[in-house]
Image (cartoon, helix red, strand yellow):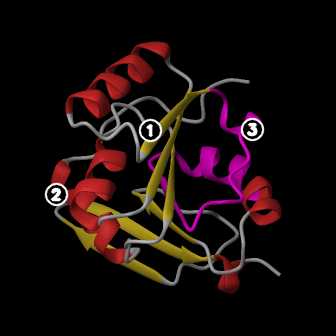
């Protein structure tokens, strides 16, 4: 399976705004699909106190970099990073999904999310929407667009 998007990191202020919009909080589990250098995972744990953050990343160099950052921040007990294709990872435990893919990548992922996510789950996407879903909220922020989706509003 090919990548769903090239690696482009989200600026720290966009990461923070994404987590604010999705209302990340203690007691929740966040999955970052295409977790790159791990910045969303680390921010979610350090600044939003999520209980567990899970990254899924296909590129081994980025997995290594992210794991090193997690280790440096002493967050190994709260953050796991899988070096896998997202289609090989069960995301059903997620309360929150964060994405910075492409619209095509999001749309390929949509059936998996509809099948596995619980109704209370929320998805926040940086710059790219899902074609067939109506977002709960769309916010322009510093030249970026952030899309919030609630599974209860998009999936049957």
Please name the residue that numbered disc 2 is placed on.
13
In the rendered view, tell whether residue 112 sits above or below residue 147: above
Please name the residue that numbered disc 1 is placed on.
35
* Label whose residue precedes the other's in the sequence (3 or 1): 1
Residue 140 in the image, given as x and y percentages of width and height:
27, 71
Provide the residue span drawn in magenta. 84-110
Tell me: 91 left or right of 57. right
Quadrant hosting residue 48: bottom left
What is the secondary structure assignment of the residue under circle 3?
Answer: helix
Tell me: 15 left or right of 137. left
Q: CA distance from mark 1 to mark 2?
A: 16 Å
In the rendered view, tell whether residue 58 sits above or below residue 108: above
Please name the residue that numbered disc 3 is placed on.
87
Circles 3, 2 touching at the beta carbon (< 8 Å): no
Quadrant hosting residue 38: top left
Whether 1 is among the magenta residues is no
Residue that sits furthest to the front in the current view: 77
Residue 138 in the image, given as x and y percentages of width and height:
40, 77
Residue 6 in the image, given as x and y percentages of width and height:
46, 29
Q: CA distance from mark 3 to mark 2?
A: 29 Å
Q: CA distance from mark 3 to mark 1?
A: 14 Å
Q: Nearer the viewer, mark 1 or mark 2?
A: 1
How packed mark 1 is, by other alpha carbons closer than 10 Å (few <14, some 14-19, many 20 or more), is: many
In the rendered view, tell whether residue 62 sits above or below residue 131: above
Circles 3, 1 touching at the beta carbon (< 8 Å): no
Circles 1, 2 touching at the beta carbon (< 8 Å): no
* Label whose residue precedes the other's in the sequence (3 or 2): 2
């Amino acid at each position: 399976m090919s990548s769903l998007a090239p690696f482009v990191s989200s600026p720290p202020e966009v990461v923070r705004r994404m987590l604010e919009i999705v209302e990340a909080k203690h007691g929740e589990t966040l999955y970052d699909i295409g977790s790159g250098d791990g910045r969303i995972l680390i921010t979610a744990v350090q600044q939003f106190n999520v209980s567990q953050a899970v990254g899924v990343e296909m590129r081994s160099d980025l997995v290594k970099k992210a794991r090193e950052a997690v280790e440096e921040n002493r967050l190994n007990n709260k953050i796991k990073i899988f070096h896998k294709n997202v289609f090989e990872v069960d995301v059903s435990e997620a309360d929150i999904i964060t994405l910075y893919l492409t619209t095509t990548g999001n749309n390929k992922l949509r059936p998996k999310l509809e099948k596995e996510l619980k109704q209370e789950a929320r998805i926040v996407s940086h710059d790219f929407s899902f074609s067939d879903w109506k977002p709960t909220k769309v916010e322009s922020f510093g030249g970026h667009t952030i899309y919030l989706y609630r599974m209860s509003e998009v999936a049957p």
